[in-house]
Amino acid sequence: MNDKKFYITTPIYYPSAEFHIGHCYTTIIADAIARYKRLDGYDVFFQTGTDEHGLKIETKAKEKGVTPKEYVDVIIENAKDLWKSLGISYDFFIRTTDDFHVEKVQQIFKKLYDQGDIYKSEYQGLYCVPCESFWTETQLVDGKCPDCGRDVHEVTEEAYFFKLSKYQQKLEEYYETHPEFIQPVSRKNEMLNNFIRPGLEDLCVSRTSFKWGIPVSFDDKHVIYVWIDALTNYITSLGYPELTPEFKKYWPADLHLVGKEIVRFHTIIWPAILMALDLPLPHQVFGHGWLIIDGGKISKSKGNYKDPREYINTYGVDAVRYFALREVPFGSDGNFSEESLITRTNADLCNVLGNLVSRTIQMGIKYFDGFISNKNVSQDIDNELIDATNNLKSLVDDKMSELKINEALESIFEVLRKCNKYIDDTTPWILAKDETQKDRLETVIYNLLDSIRVCAILLQAFIPTTSEKIFSGLKISNTSFEDLYVKNDTYELGLEKPANLFERIKED
């Protein structure tokens, strides 16, 4: 049994409209981390899914003349097709309308009620329909929702409440004793200073003003309000409240990836629910920034985005994946534009990687009919490239453990740039003119091929389709991380020039 486990989740996305590049951003990053961990020998459970209940979807479905389930089914099938287009390697896709989830949420709600952590009262407050969030007067910004800037509405209704205030001190203590729990650190400071220390209020966890939700099993006038329904997906998928083998194996989660706008729910409400259930908390919640288009957040209501498949079909899946992973330091906001995507694709994927692989394999075929072995005719000029290649896995490991994914990719591309410089410095085309330099020439090409091989193995987590093309050109099948530094000193099956990995894109 593999004792190296890794459980990673995306948020469960709200399917009120078709998914955009912002949804793709989080999911591509989660996929790259999951792939990297698998390659590194971990037993990975990678979960994504959709949060499908609430007033907003009930209203939209009514406008369309369909049931809420019919409304979300179309969007979710489209989302699954989009994930397939992006090569997302999730292990489980949860929907909060899944029968098993509905039943388990009702059991969790009843458990919390029976032990006194949920009670019935009356709610009076300010409610934002698009965000499905309640706010106090002091939390509003210019009288509007602090998350989306829209109007809020006064709501009064009977409701069940979760005793969030009961867990305030425990949450503060947990933050202090587990500094890695919320990342980046700025998010932790925001949660402490803006929400916890001013005082936590008990949380409304049921509604009576709409019907599209999971009924409270012992009071069917109420539906369970979004956060207990949504957040518990991370454990219901593993079988909880039943302590299944899957639950015992994978919980607690190692990493929840969430957008910064829902950090509050994942680092205050979710830990408090887990504390009430006497369950261990996830190891880390990482609140990343937004992709920005034209200076503003990508927004369903603004419609300021294209179907991501338009980018995939125009530029290729790995160009889109690479841009999402490389362009923005993970945790910060970053701009998304086709101009930037084109520039990044041409500069890195076409000029650095594509040209290197193409000309190295071409030289191997031209000078040695594609059969290359290491003649070990080495010179000092080789050492910088060989050392950088040999140290690369360790360097990338360090960057990935800190979720500095753009820097992990930059480390790989730095070695690829060294390969291009090595070609310029060793001048293989001049060596080829001198018969006495044939073994030296073959050593140079071998060194290049071996560095390309190592980089391609590491790049599998990020741009898997491209890596497969490189493996095909090198005629190698040993592509696990265990194979990274196993030297066989020969490319004996014969090289085969792959089709251009990336075509240069014309910039308008």
Image: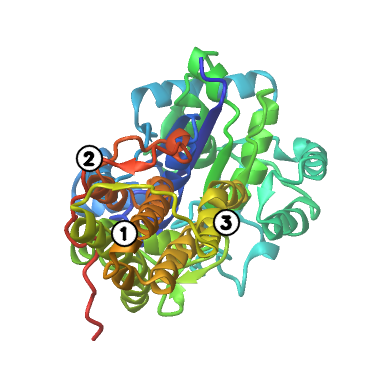
Residue identified by numbered label 2: 493
Q: Give the foreground label among 1 and 2.
A: 1
Badge 1 element:
helix
Residue found 49% across the figure and 30% down from its top: 41
Q: Do the residues labelled 3 and 2 touch (CB within 8 Å)?
A: no
The colour style of the image is rainbow
In the rendered structure, the answer to whether residue 122 lies left or right of residue 68 reads right
**Rendered view: 370 above or below 422:** above
> Label 2 sits on what residue type?
Leu
Tell me the SS state at disc 2.
loop
Q: Residue at x 66, y 32 (%)?
A: 281
Depth check: give the residue in front, 403 or 23.
Answer: 403
Which one is in front, 55 or 34?
A: 34
Quadrant that contains the C terminus: bottom left
User: In this view of the protein, which residue sits in the foreground, 28 or 476?
Assistant: 476
Q: Can residue 35 be seen by looking at this rendering?
A: yes
Circle nearer the N terminus (1, 3): 3
Q: Name the residue under label 3.
A: 404
Amino acid residing under circle 1: Lys
From the top left corner, tell me how far across and down residue 213 is, in percent: 40, 36
**Numbered disc 3: secondary structure:** loop
State the CA–CA distance, disc 3 to disc 2: 37 Å
Total label count?
A: 3
Q: Residue at x 19, y 55 (%)?
A: 498
Q: In this view, does 314 lie above or below 134?
A: below
Residue position for label 1: 438
Work out whether mark 3 precedes mark 2 in sequence or the reverse, and give the earlier one.
3
